[in-house]
């Protein structure tokens, strides 16, 4: 019996002393290498895209929620031109901004894809989370997609959303 109590105490201490886990895509070092160092050309077309990204969904009823992991992909469909992403802001269900992923424009090389990961433990966005991306390009606009998924037991849920170009004003 004493051995079991000792084991439980050790387990409790070891799990309670861990630092909170950092979220995948919020580390500024991930974005630093992509930051635009020089000024961007003046002739670039500007645009904004809205992308639904669900942190949680209702399962079985209106009281049971399931957390989702999401991979947000930003695709550059151009064979020769870079695309510039000026802003990526994540909003929760209530329309409140949760976080911005970078504070200076980044570039995406031709035919490259860049991801933002919303961890499965990050349910701050809720059941109606979304992104607004501001971008610039001299060719085709970027393509934005999100893949959300979760598993529990032997069942899995996954689905995809696509970004829609919007007028911000």
Image (cartoon, helix red, strand yellow):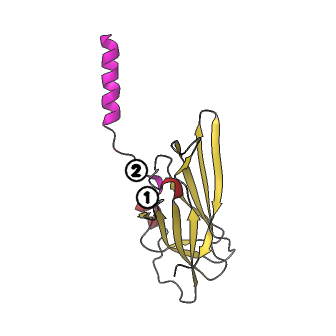
Residue 109 % position (x, y): 60, 71
* 46 w.r.t. 101: above or below: below
Hey, which quadrant is residue 10 in on the image?
Answer: top left
Left or right of 44 in this view: 102: left
Q: Residue furthest top?
A: 1
Up-down relation of residue 17 to residue 32 (above or below): above
Q: Which residue is mark 1?
A: 26
Q: Are marks 2 and 1 in contact (CB under 8 Å)?
A: yes
The mark found on residue 22 in the picture is 2
The secondary structure type at the circle numbered 1 is helix
Q: Does residue 11 show up magenta in the picture?
A: yes
Total labels drawn = 2
Q: Which residues are magenta?
A: 1-27
For the N terminus, the quadrant is: top left
At a point 47% along the width and 63% down the height, the residue shown is 91
Q: Secondary structure at mark 2?
A: loop
What is the spatial separation of the Cα atoms under label 2 and label 1, in whole angstroms?
8 Å
Q: Quadrant of residue 47?
A: bottom right
Q: Position of residue 82 (x, y in %)?
A: 60, 76
Pick the front one: 67 or 39 = 67
């Amino acid at each position: 019996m004493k051995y079991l109590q000792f084991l439980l105490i050790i387990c409790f201490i070891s799990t309670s002393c861990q630092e909170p886990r950092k979220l995948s895509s919020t580390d500024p070092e991930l974005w630093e290498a992509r930051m635009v160092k020089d000024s961007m050309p003046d002739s670039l077309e500007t645009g904004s895209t809205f992308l639904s990204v669900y942190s949680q969904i209702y399962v079985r009823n209106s009281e049971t929620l399931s957390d989702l992991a999401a991979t947000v992909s930003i695709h550059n469909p151009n064979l020769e031109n870079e695309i510039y992403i000026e802003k990526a802001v994540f909003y929760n269900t209530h329309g409140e901004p949760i976080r911005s992923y970078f504070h200076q424009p980044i570039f995406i090389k031709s035919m490259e894809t860049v991801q933002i990961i919303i961890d499965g433990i990050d349910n701050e966005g809720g059941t109606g989370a979304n992104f607004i991306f501001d971008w610039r390009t001299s060719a085709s606009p970027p393509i934005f997609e999100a893949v959300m998924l979760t598993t529990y037991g032997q069942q899995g849920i996954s689905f995809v959303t696509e970004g829609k170009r919007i007028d911000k004003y």
